[in-house]
Amino acid sequence: MGKFVMPSLGSEMIDAKLVQWFIQPGDKVNKGDIIGEIDTEKGLIDIEIFEEGIVTELIAKEGETIPVGSIMAIINGADEKTKVEVIETKQQEPNGEKELPKKNGKLKHPHKEDNKESTVKVKASPLARRVAEDLGVDLTKVGGSGPAGTIHRKDVEAFAELKKADETFEKELEMADHLSAADKKSMRHSIAAAMSRSNQEIPHYYLEIDIDMKRALDWLQETNNKRPVNERLMPAMLLIKTVANALAEVPELNGFWTDEAMHIEEGIHIGFAISLRQGGLVIPAILNADRKSLDEIRSEFVDMVTRAREGHLRSREVSSATITLTSLGERGAQKVYGVIYPPQVALIGFGKIMERPHAVEGMIGIRPVLSTVLAGDHRATDGHTGSRFLEKINEQLQHPEAL
């Protein structure tokens, strides 16, 4: 019998308030399912389950403040394969709408019928079906990522996001924040505590390199000219992928300083700082970024920015970053000297891409240049390691077509 406990979302976190459960005793849960929502100094966070089983008991009550590590629920582990439900529907002549079968007395959402009669089988977890009902998603149109095409919650959510793809990236970044004055004060307090600890405990060293971005920007423009506006890549996507690839070659900077030792992590999870327009800062992570394509990174980046500003990040997203990336973009300063977020051992800061004199093959010209600054923890690495890492970033950006 497994015990689900209040997760730790950072070294400064002591407790959090349970806002609501998304599960009930008797529900089947799978690894990666969102089972509840908690209120932290970082905002509202969706909490995930990392095991498969049946919910036996909900110990924590909605509205309670629960210390980190305290038991919130009992999950009875399931040895058998994940149970999925198969729904069969008939699609006939278009004479209106046909209702899907009832389950436990509850009527499923209606499904429009096609011209030809056919049998459609839908394999989906119970949680995915409930989420599909809430989002108004037709499961017969969703591709499943699980065994034998089984649909999980993440597949439903991804499909729902695609329905909103007509909005441009810039419009999504302009979404309004929903932070109260108390929320902003709490978030600032949390940031101040983490940064104060960082300055006190971490012996920082800084290394800087200027990167010629002409090839990267030319490739980006050429690529985007072939894409719809809502699918275009931004420089931030290139930077996230570049840092991930560089860490794969210089893994000494990918991990945490704990128990007076460096622990290199196998997964490369790039945390990126999102500044909320009405105050505050959050740092969600794109997990396993080195294994993702630029399009996958773009999709996750847009999704996380949107959810961060709505206050709906997930627990694993805000607790898994193995390094932090901060980019000030077009409105930023030329250089960023960041402060490492403990227990990470490095932060990479990208300034504003600026036109300035730069030598190329012995000739001085005006080029788009990106000042890149690495903040490293001297307990874990040294300048030699940091220099290799920056050189790998430079090499990657000179060959953007290979990203």
Image (spheres, helix red, strand yellow):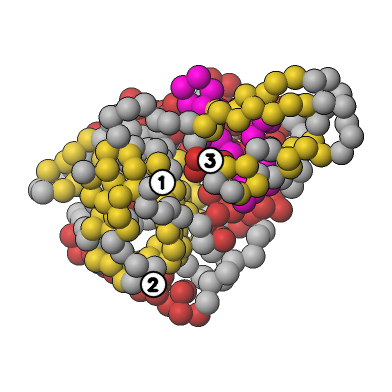
Residue type, mark 2 in image: Gly
Marker disc for residue 63: 2
- For the residue labelled by badge 1, is the local secondary structure a helix, a strand or a loop? loop
What is the spatial separation of the Cα atoms under label 1 and label 2, in whole angstroms? 21 Å
Instruction: Tell me what residue is drawn at x 24 percent, y 66 percent.
Output: 67
Residue furthest out toward the left: 260
Instruction: Tell me what residue is drawn at x 64 percent, y 65 percent.
Output: 176
* Label 1: how many Cα within 10 Å (few below 14, some 14–19, many 20+): some
Instruction: Tell me what residue is drawn at x 34 percent, y 48 percent.
Output: 55
Instruction: Tell me what residue is drawn at x 67 percent, y 59 percent.
Output: 174
Give the percent coordinates (x, y) of residue 131. 57, 46
Task: Give the side of residue 18 with respect to residue 204, left or right.
Answer: right
Of residues 76 and 203, the one drawn nearer to the viewer in this rendering: 76
Q: Quadrant of residue 270?
A: top left
Residue type, mark 1 in image: Asp
Task: Give the side of residue 179 with respect to residue 163, left or right.
Answer: left
Asked if 291 appears above or below 172 in the picture, the reply is: above
- For the residue labelled by badge 2, is the local secondary structure a helix, a strand or a loop? loop
| Mark 1 or 2, nearer chain start | 1
Residue 385 appears in the rendering: no
Q: Which residue is mark 3?
A: 128
User: For the N terminus, which image quadrant?
Assistant: top left
